[in-house]
C-alpha cells in the first residue's frame, strides 16, 4: 500500500466543487450537493423537464456552448482554480491508466483459465471469479466475469480501483 489512493474532490473547470451530479450511478437521484444545498430548492422546486439546466453549479456546459439566460443563483458556489483543475486531471489520468491496466490484467488471467479449460476439456458454467495484484496499490483486486456478459472488479483497498459491468463481453471458447 505504497501510495494514497483517495480520490480528490472533482475539480473540473467551470463546475462548482460541491457539485455531485444530480444523477448518480444506477440513476438514483442525488438531492443535495456536498455543501448541503438542495438542487431543486435552487430552482424553486420547478418540475419541468430540463429544470437542472438552470442549476448554477456549472458556469459553462462542457458539451456545448448553450447556457440558460436565467441561471439560478447559489451563495455556496465555489469554482476551482487552475491548480486544482490540473491536480485533478493528473490524478484522473493516472487512476484511469491504472484501471485500464487492471482490466487488462484480469482479462489475461481469464483467458489463461479459458485456455486451460480448452486443454483439459472442462466445461465451465456460471460466473468466473478470480483475483489479481492491484496495479495501483499492490493490494488484492477481485474480479468477476459474468456468464451473462460483462465484468466487474474491485480492489480490497478503500477508494482504489473499481469497475462495473463494462458492456464488452469477454467471449468464451
Ligand atoms: Zn488497489
Image (cartoon, grey):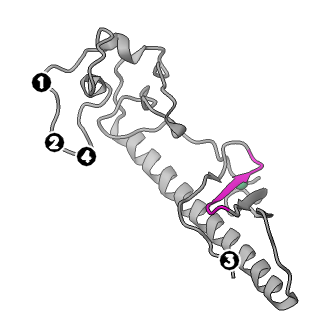
Task: Confirm or deny contact between disc 4 and disc 1 (CB under 8 A).
Answer: no
Measured in 3D between alpha carbons, the distance from the residue under mark 3 to the one under mark 4, in whole angstroms, is 38 Å
Instruction: Identify the residue at image location x=36%, y=10%.
Output: 41
- Looking at the rendered structure, the secondary structure element under dot 2 is loop
Measured in 3D between alpha carbons, the distance from the residue under mark 2 to the one under mark 1, in whole angstroms, is 12 Å
Badge 3 crowding class, 10 Å Cα cut-off, few under 14, some 14 to 19, many 20 or more, is few
Relative to the observer, which residue lies in front, 2 or 150? 150
Badge 1 crowding class, 10 Å Cα cut-off, few under 14, some 14 to 19, many 20 or more, is few
Task: Confirm or deny contact between disc 3 and disc 4 (CB under 8 A).
Answer: no
Residue hosting label 4: 63
Picture quarter containing residue 71?
top left
Residue hosting label 3: 172
Where's the C terminus, which quadrant? bottom right
Boundaries of the magenta span: 148-157
Residue hosting label 2: 65
Q: Is residue 18 above or below residue 171?
A: above
Measured in 3D between alpha carbons, the distance from the residue under mark 4 to the one under mark 1, in whole angstroms, is 17 Å
* 145 on left or right of 26: right
Q: Position of residue 1 (x, y in %)?
A: 77, 52
Instruction: Identify the residue at image location x=49%, y=25%.
Output: 30
Quarter of the image where ligand 1 sits = bottom right
Task: Confirm or deny contact between disc 4 and disc 2 (CB under 8 A).
Answer: no
Residue hosting label 1: 69
Amino acid at each position: 500500500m505504497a501510495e494514497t489512493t483517495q480520490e480528490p474532490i472533482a475539480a473540473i473547470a467551470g463546475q462548482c466543487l460541491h457539485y455531485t451530479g444530480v444523477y448518480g450511478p444506477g440513476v438514483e437521484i442525488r438531492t443535495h450537493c456536498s455543501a448541503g444545498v438542495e438542487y431543486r430548492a435552487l430552482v424553486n422546486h420547478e418540475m419541468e423537464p430540463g429544470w437542472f439546466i438552470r442549476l448554477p453549479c456549472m458556469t459553462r456546459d462542457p458539451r456545448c456552448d448553450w447556457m440558460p439566460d436565467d441561471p439560478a443563483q447559489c451563495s455556496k458556489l465555489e469554482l476551482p482554480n487552475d491548480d486544482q483543475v490540473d491536480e485533478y486531471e493528473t490524478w484522473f489520468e493516472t487512476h484511469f491508466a491504472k484501471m485500464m491496466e487492471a482490466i487488462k490484467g484480469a482479462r489475461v488471467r481469464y483467458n489463461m483459465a479459458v485456455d486451460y479449460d480448452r486443454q483439459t476439456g472442462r466445461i465451465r458454467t456460471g460466473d468466473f471469479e478470480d483475483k489479481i495484484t492491484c496495479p495501483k496499490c499492490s493490494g488484492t483486486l477481485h474480479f468477476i466475469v459474468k456468464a451473462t456478459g460483462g465484468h466487474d472488479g474491485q480492489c480490497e483497498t478503500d477508494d482504489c480501483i473499481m469497475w462495473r459491468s463494462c458492456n464488452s463481453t469477454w467471449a468464451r471458447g
